[in-house]
Image (cartoon, coloured by chain):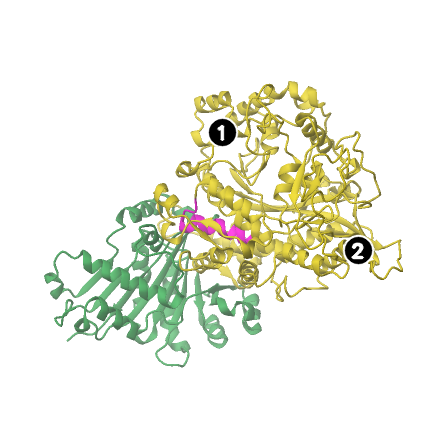
Amino acid sequence: MNDIPILPKCRSIVFETGNILNWNRLKKRPLTALPASEEILDSIRCLFNGWLNAQTEQHSLQYTDQLRVTCPVQKQLDMAQRQAMLDDREELRIYIKLTVYIDTYWRGAVSDAVETALASLAAEDCDGVVLSLVSSGPQPPLLDEVKPIWAELEELRAADVVGSLGLADVDSDLLEQLYDWAAEKPSIYQLSAQAACTAPSRLREFASANRLQVLVHSDPADPLPADRLRDIFGGVLGAADATGWQPGWLARITTSYRHRGVVSSWGFVSKVQRQVA
Amino acid sequence: MGLLSEGTPLSWSETQKHSEHVRQHGIRQFISLYYRLKDRTKDSLKWGDEVEYQLVRLTKSAASSSDQQQQQSQLASQLALVADQILPELQREEIENGGRASTLWRPEYAAYMVEGVPGEPYGHLLAHLNLVEANMRKRRAQVQSLLGSDVYALTLTAFPRLGCPDFCYPGAKPTPEGGVSCSAFLPDEVIYSGHPRFRTLTRNIRERRGKKVAINIPVYRDLNTPDGLLEPPTEHTAAALPGHIYMDAMGFGMGCCCLQMTFQACSITEAYLLYDQLTPLSPVLLALSAASPVHRGWLADTDTRWRVISGAVDCRTDEEMGLKPLERNRFRIAKSRYDSIDSYLSADGQAYNDIPLTMDEDILRQLMEAGVEPSLSRHLAHLFIRDPVSLFSEKIHQSDTEESDHFENIQSTNWQSMRFKPPPTNSTIGWRVEFRCAEVQLTDFENAAYVVFIVLLTRVLLTLQIDLLMPISKVDENFNRAQQRDAVKRQKFFFRSGAHLYDNDPELVKAELREFTLDEIVNGCQDFPGLVPLIRQYLSMSHTDVDTMCTLNQYLNLIQKRARGELLTTAAWIRKFVTEHPAYQRDSRCTEAISSDLMAKCVEITQGSYRPDELLPCTSSKTSDTLPQVISDAELYLDNRPRRNGPK
């Protein structure tokens, strides 16, 4: 670790894991059950370290403004899966769980996230996006904060880039308000797996009346806390590179074989950003 | 098995004359099937379970006793030989609707047994897992509704006093001098008589062997257990071993109930993979589901039915067992027709086939010349060393291309821990794998939990593509250990460690094989992530609806607690009930009084009116009869929706 920053001009990094299931196969990481809150962060750290070690020279990084950090080792395995995607899209189901940070949201961020996610799979469209929101403070998101984000999803839905829309973890008030306002209604509501046996009756009744699937997830509420992000940067690159980074969005991508209940790929793409003088 | 076709069974000597004919045409039938169907792909996941029930009659005991020391139970329990009376009614909906019904029923070996399966296979959605228990409840209710007020449909692996005096109703006497079983304990009336298949199998196995079957299970030694022979010897019990529970008929084994599952794979290659990867898991499931510690009124030193059935259908002659030099028989055969599998089927699995495989070389040659893969050829050449033990005159002459009864004849009388099932002729069904070890539990909740656990494991294996294979000799060693008394708590099992779940090097794997407790295998430890944590990882990547998740949490919770020893296995609970019963004399005997009280408790547990804390958790699932409409609609929508730049 040194005091000279490696990426002094960099304002935006996209992390792209590829298929994390392949990481296990390539022994990039032992097969253990990490707690959900750690999995994303650990994957970023792994990915970043691997990427850095693969850089033959670091001089050009001094000028880099935007960076794409991908997994250097598993091109071949991923290529085979990309080919399968092109040949056999009908046989696959692609779902994206999109976490948007309200604080750092910018118009176009959702589109950016979904298109980046699809490009990482060589896919043209996905079967569903479930939106999860992280607000800045302790108060839950407000409808007005959610509207522009949802509006972007509606555009993607209208263009058939996304097959269905969903929402995660919002309280019943917001769910019902959004449902009322939206042109394209959510068809999925996700809540935490811990709460599966005790889902509140107001939610269940609303879902039942409005044909919402109520599904569960095991994802942490905030998968990329800014301080943990900065720790990772500090650990991989050095303290000089760690300041200012904020999460932009995180798109978790799952691809499954239709009608077989077998997951073929799981991974994520994520954008983090900072201001630079 | 499907609806049994009627027919005229041949005698054993007649059957034997056609033995080679059946084998030769059976293989040709397989080759024909193989060619037509080996390249099938994209078959969806469909699967089903089979549950077997025993019909138990509980009545107030006729003999009231004033003998305080005996503490006679007020109840008597017997097996009710009424399957032939209720099956026509159970099958009525299916027959009237051209084979379709919400539940399907089949006879089983014993006149006190019936088998029920769901009318339609379950599908690929996680939400389908939430239907299993409700369907099982429906089946049980259906059977129960046809039974008299004092007869109960119990999912009991082994009736404790099968073969003891007065154990069945209507009463019947064993006929050791003649008849079909020639048993000193089991009357022939115990065999289902609505179809000749079971009596034919019984007689033919006995005649082929040259003597009645001999099952000897080590007795549980307690303070007052008799030394030497458990019972005074008679001319009909010469094969009894000292210190062992002796049984002498097919009915002791095939009259046990079990829980089976069949999965459709998307291709033949996936079927090989599932068959192989489930194999190291079979002893794990056997130990976890152990439910039969009592046989013929004696407490055994084992907890499962496995050795009992293995001995019950062992058709091997003395020559084949290596007790005499080979003269009239062709092969030394290491195992009974009912036992664990002898070889892996996948290409990668071949390196772990380390037990000698007895094969019919001519059949092997035919299969290889026909282009059937070597591993599959060897597997079939091994299955086909067996003689057919049942043949119907109407079925002797068959088409090699349009029919498959000869193939099924040999295939279905190799009763192994796994079965590899080709697609049937003239159907849309694909390559399938059957998982056959699990013992059946008392409640639908438990049975659904075990079934769902195994289904989830298959999805995890295919998703994570981990490799559990180990030398097949070690799997057999695990099988031995899995049957032992309290195996869950007292045994360790060979298992592949976490560091090698992705290794391709069999030598490395063999060198580093470790022994784990069941708790470590199921719940995880330093060296292995744990089957349940792996399942949870899979679930976190999948779309699970809230009710299904609640149900799955309950099921996984049960499995975890059983593995940890926090909840008893059914076998441990039964054993505890017997040994703690006031009438128990520390002599390993499960008397009529103890057995009847046990059966009464089992009825209460089944009905939900009694829940032993040490056996069952206090929560229940959110199982449902039907898929939520919103989920099936979503699937339909996704299958048909327009895509950007897509063909639709």
Residue A248 in sight here: yes
Q: In the rendered image, which quarter contains the N terminus of chain B?
A: top right
Q: Which chain is yellow?
A: B
Give the label, 1 or 2, closer to the camera: 2
Residue found at x 65% / y 21%: B16
Q: Would you say residue B453 sits in the magenta stretch?
A: yes
Q: Amino acid at mark 2?
A: Ala
Determine whether, in the image, residue B237 is placed left or right of residue B413. right
List x then y, in percent, for residue A88. 38, 44
Residue highlighted by disc 1: B34
Q: Which residues are magenta?
A: B452-469
Decide which of B278, B588 is in the foreground and name it.
Answer: B588
Marks 1 & 2 on one chain: yes
Q: Would you say residue A209 sits in the magenta stretch?
A: no
Residue highlighted by disc 2: B593
Please, what is the dominant secondary structure of the magenta stretch? helix
Determine the chain carrying the residue at label 2: B
Residue found at x 48% / y 36%: B343
- The image quadrant of residue B625 is bottom right
Q: Residue furthest front?
A: B227
Q: Amino acid at mark 1?
A: Tyr
Q: Which chain is green?
A: A
List x then y, in percent, for residue B533. 45, 59
